[in-house]
C-alpha cells in the first residue's frame, strides 16, 4: 500500500514539474489517501499482533 502511495507521489511530482497541475493534484490526493490507509492498517496490525490458531 505504501509503495503505491510512493508511486503516485512520484507521478504527482513529475506532473507538477511538467505543468500538468490537474493530474498532479489528483495523483497527490490518491497518494495521500493510500498513505493514510496504509498507516492505519500498519497501526492496527501492530496493536493486534499475531495470534496462534485455536487448538
Image (tube, grey):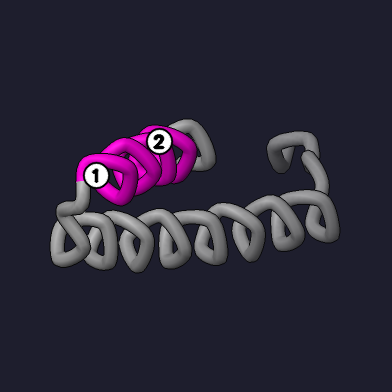
Asked whether 29 or 49 is in front, the reply is 29
Residue 7: say if magenta: yes
Residue, x 79% and y 57% (percent of image)? 48
Q: Nearer the viewer, mark 1 or mark 2?
A: 1
Rendered location of residue 12, percent (x, y): 33, 48
Mark 2 Cα-neighbour bin, 10 Å: few <14, some 14–19, many ≥20: some
Residue 17: say if magenta: yes
Among the two numbered marks 1 and 2 on one chain, the one whose residue lies closer to the N terminus: 2
Q: Secondary structure at mark 1?
A: helix
Q: Secondary structure at mark 2?
A: helix
Q: Which residues are magenta?
A: 4-18
Q: Which residue is mark 1?
A: 15
Query: What's the distance in space between the residues labelled 1 and 2, CA to CA?
Result: 9 Å
Q: Which residue is mark 2?
A: 10
Rendered location of residue 38, percent (x, y): 55, 53
| Count of numbered circles on the image | 2
Asked whether 7 or 10 is in front, the reply is 10
Amino acid at each position: 500500500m505504501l509503495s503505491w502511495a510512493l508511486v503516485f507521489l512520484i507521478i504527482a511530482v513529475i506532473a507538477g514539474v511538467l505543468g500538468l497541475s490537474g493530474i498532479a493534484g489528483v495523483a497527490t490526493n490518491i497518494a495521500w489517501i493510500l498513505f493514510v490507509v496504509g498507516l492505519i492498517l500498519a497501526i492496527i496490525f501492530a496493536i493486534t499482533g499475531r495470534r496462534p490458531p485455536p487448538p
